[in-house]
Image (spheres, rainbow, N blue to C red):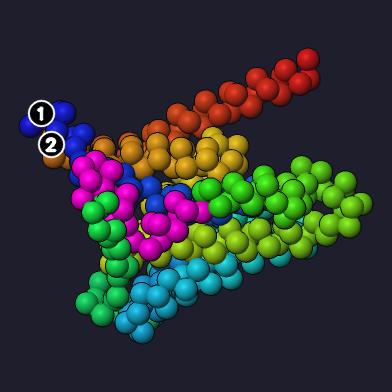
Amino acid sequence: MNFLDLFDQDLVASVLRSLIPILLAALGGMLAERVGIFNIGLEGMILVGAFAGVAASFFTHNWIIGTIVAMLSGALFSLILGYGAVYRKGDPIVLAIAMNILAVGMTSFLIVAVFGVQGVFQDPGIDGLPVWRIPILADIPWIGALFALTPLGYLALILVPVLWVVLFRTPLGLRLRGVGERPLAAATMGVKPQHYQLGAVIASGALAGLGGAQLALGNVVQFTENMSAGRGWIAVVAVMLARAHPVGVLGAALLFGFADAVGFRLQSFGLPQQLTDAGPYVLTLVVLILVSRRFRKSREAVLA
């Protein structure tokens, strides 16, 4: 097989499929970052949203209800971080790590308690997300995949410009950025930083929960233990790489989605699955090293 066969029209669809869960979670992490809360609990929020979405879709046979339940579950789960970090002054890093561990254990227990299976729950009764094709546009070579997405796929792409407008062109965005950058100054202007921080963390959890719904009801119609598989951590790195800017988050998530899609397709060349699966995470480590070097140089320049 020719190496150039990797780069065909199907690759675009694969990249988008890998991109959407990461992008939704990263946009949520960006909102939390903007108010001064570093949310590394995205991994657990995705996992909770994935399980809740599959369970609700299975029992109601309705993907809309499954999606809403996934979003609400992510939002509720994020209250651990929101309340603990904002109102109890807990360390957000410690809280988020504990949440990730809790999510893995809780979902592993619930898949046995609720469905009576271990590892994977797959059933025809699960109502997966539909693919909404836009006539004519979906048939355009190469870019047609952009017009044949799930509802959450369209939502993720639309949220990028919407959040850019909200953050940089509205009073609400000014308050959010003010709370994150100058909380004391914002408080003197009558803004209540805690309210905005809690709201942003809840929104972060809701978006990560939607990422879980896309992963479990859109990419695959099933729930697998620990199926988030590091996507939350990749979303965290995307936020760092983009410096919490919506357009930058899209670019960073696209980079990781591309690495994931190419890694999967490389298996057709006989490469071991373990090697190709490691691709996005190796890229994540490289990006973390580059970002940390950039931050160190910036800090040294300020101190000098």
User: Looking at the figure, which quarter contains the N terminus?
Assistant: top left
Q: Image height check: is 113 above or below 193?
A: below
User: Looking at the figure, which quarter contains the C terminus?
Assistant: top right
Residue located at (66% from left, 58% from top): 200
Q: Which residue bears the numbered disc 2?
A: 270
Residue extent of the magenta highlight: 139-159
Instruction: State which tag comes first along the sequence, 1 or 2.
Output: 1
By secondary structure, the bulk of the magenta-drawn segment is best described as helix
Which residue is the extreme one toward the top?
Answer: 304
Disc 1 element: loop
Image position, residue 52 (x, y; %): 43, 73
Which quarter of the picture shows residue 118?
Answer: bottom left
- In the image, taking residue 117 as reference, residue 87 lies left or right, namely right
Looking at the rendered structure, the kind of residue marked 1 is Asn
Q: Nearer the viewer, mark 1 or mark 2?
A: 1
Residue located at (27% from left, 51% from top): 137
- In the image, taking residue 284 as reference, residue 265 lies left or right, namely left
Residue located at (81% from left, 43% from top): 182
In terms of depth relative to the viewer, which is nearer, 258 or 232?
Answer: 258
Q: Which residue bears the numbered disc 1?
A: 2
Disc 2 element: loop
